[in-house]
Amino acid sequence: MNLLQILVLALVQGAAELLPVSSSAHVIVAEKLMGLDPTSPQMTLLLVMLHTGTMFAVIVHYWASWRATYFQSAAAFKVNALNVLVATLATGVVGLLLLDVIKRVVAHNAPGFEIEHLFGNARLMAAALACAGVLIMASSRFGERGGGELTLARSATIGAVQGLCLPFRGFSRSGATISAGLSMGVLRKRAEEFSFALAVVLTPAVIVKEALRLAKAPAELAAGGLVHAAGPGLLGMCLSFLAGLAALRWLSRWLEQDRWHLFGGYCLFASLVVLLVG
């Protein structure tokens, strides 16, 4: 993997990860266009490193806002921490159940099947992008109603929607969770903050999962993957961090300006591109 490929992947990941357009689908298409294998352990590890960079961008961008809301008092912290916990548990339950169904129905319980084997499926990615686009456009029609605050029921629903996104590259996590919040009347700012709080909680688990996946690869492949992916991964992480900060400013501005639906239109367009490229 050369420097130009790392630069392209980092910028695509950083820009698309935090926008509701599915970074994974964009990165996978970019990998294919550059002749890289998106299902290889090394590329999966690089993708996780890029996710790490954007996670730090989320923390830097939202820290002041979270401090003013989530950490303003002990009582506020307890309420918000419980909402995050409930949503994360819902994500885990729905995500694991869905993975089990996919393994049984799609892979027929094949012993070597991993969900990453589906990442190169262009039709599946295109369908997921289209679903995300429809969800985003539909949610943009809902005003800020119903009190606008998060409840345990709303948090659980958002977490369950996040769980549906996990196996499908193209089904934007941020797009789906923010749209779920908007559809239930959660204030735009609160839905945005909560979605990315869940992302910060979820990312370390994803990193551990992918590290274990690489460790299970053949010894020579795992060792080579660690050696050759570590350097590019660190460089990509720094670049995706910078691109992520710029993307978050863009997302926040469009949410405030009631232009959320434009992301949905882009997802529909991107689904057609994925079909053509795939």
Image (cartoon, rainbow, N blue to C red):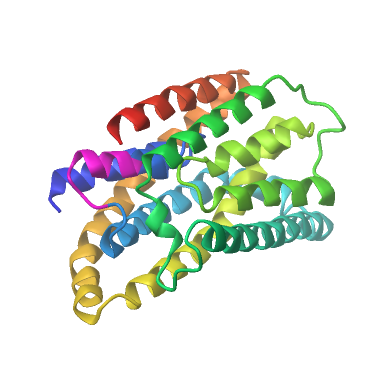
State left or right for residue 158 relative to residue 203: right
The x and y percentages for residue 221 are 21, 73
- Residue drawn at x 51%, y 53% as measured from the top left: 167
- Residue drawn at x 69%, y 51% as measured from the top left: 160
The x and y percentages for residue 109 are 50, 68
Q: Is residue 102 above or below residue 32?
A: below
State left or right for residue 31 relative to residue 53: left
Q: Quadrant of the C terminus?
A: top left
State left or right for residue 4 relative to residue 138: left
Could you say which quadrant of the image residue 222 lies in?
A: bottom left
Does the rendering let one see residue 174? yes
Q: Is residue 49 above or below residue 224?
A: above
For the residue pair 238 and 42, the one nearer the viewer reads as: 42
Q: Which residues are magenta?
A: 27-37
Does the rendering let one see residue 192? no
State left or right for residue 99 relative to residue 42: right
The x and y percentages for residue 234 are 28, 59
